[in-house]
Image: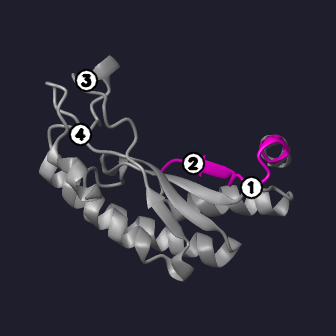
Amino acid sequence: MKNYADLTNSGYNAVKAVFPTAKVIVHINNGYDNNLYRWIFDGLKNNDGKWDVIGMSVYPGWYKTPNDWQNCNNDCLANMNDMVARYATQVMIVEAGMSWDSPAVCKSFLTDLIAKTRTVTGKKGLDVLYWEPKAYSQWQGYTLSAFDNAGKPTAALDAYK
């Protein structure tokens, strides 16, 4: 973990040298997995690791019960609040997505995730980004976009209105 903290700090210091006011994000997957986040960020903290924002990926298809987006989002919110309490840091969903052919379900997932992020303790939940929304026609096998195979946005993006 010391090597990981040193690597992270090198990136952090490089960013701050060029853009002193930029927020540096340490991003890991499975935003619903509190044990993973505690392991990573306790390890960084115990080795003097630096970050400004904890970034999370949230994909309900990878949740412990695949596509159970409601419980996935509930666990993610609990994790976000724990990260804020433990490390006094901001959190952000920097990757979210669901299959392009389930736009109504994806809209519900995103609407709920955005609402939950806005309730994070101390207003420390920054935002929710959709990862690669324009990857239509299953671009390079990627099916988690928010555009249909004709290249048109789906209802999933209505969550951002």
Q: Which residues are magenta?
A: 13-30
56 relative to 137, above or below: below
Q: Earlier in the sequence, mark 3 or mark 4?
A: 4
Q: Amino acid at mark 2?
A: Ile
Instruction: Indicate left or right for 143 with 27 as reference.
Output: left
Nearest the eye: 106 or 155: 155
Q: CA distance from mark 2 to mark 4?
A: 21 Å
The reply to whether dot 4 and dot 1 touch (C-beta < 8 Å) is no
146 relative to 82, above or below: above
Q: Earlier in the sequence, mark 2 or mark 4?
A: 2
Q: How is the image coloured?
A: one colour
Residue linked to disc 2: 28
Q: Earlier in the sequence, mark 4 or mark 1?
A: 1
Q: Amino acid at mark 3?
A: Gln
Q: Residue furthest top?
A: 140
The picture places residue 114, in percent across and down from the top left corner, at 35, 64
Residue linked to disc 4: 99
**Residue in the picture at 49% in, 59% down:** 33
Mark 3 residue crowding within 10 angstroms, few (<14) / some (14–19) / many (20+): some
Nearest the eye: 126 or 161: 161
36 relative to 112, above or below: above
Q: Amino acid at mark 4?
A: Ser
Mark 2, secondary structure of its residue: strand
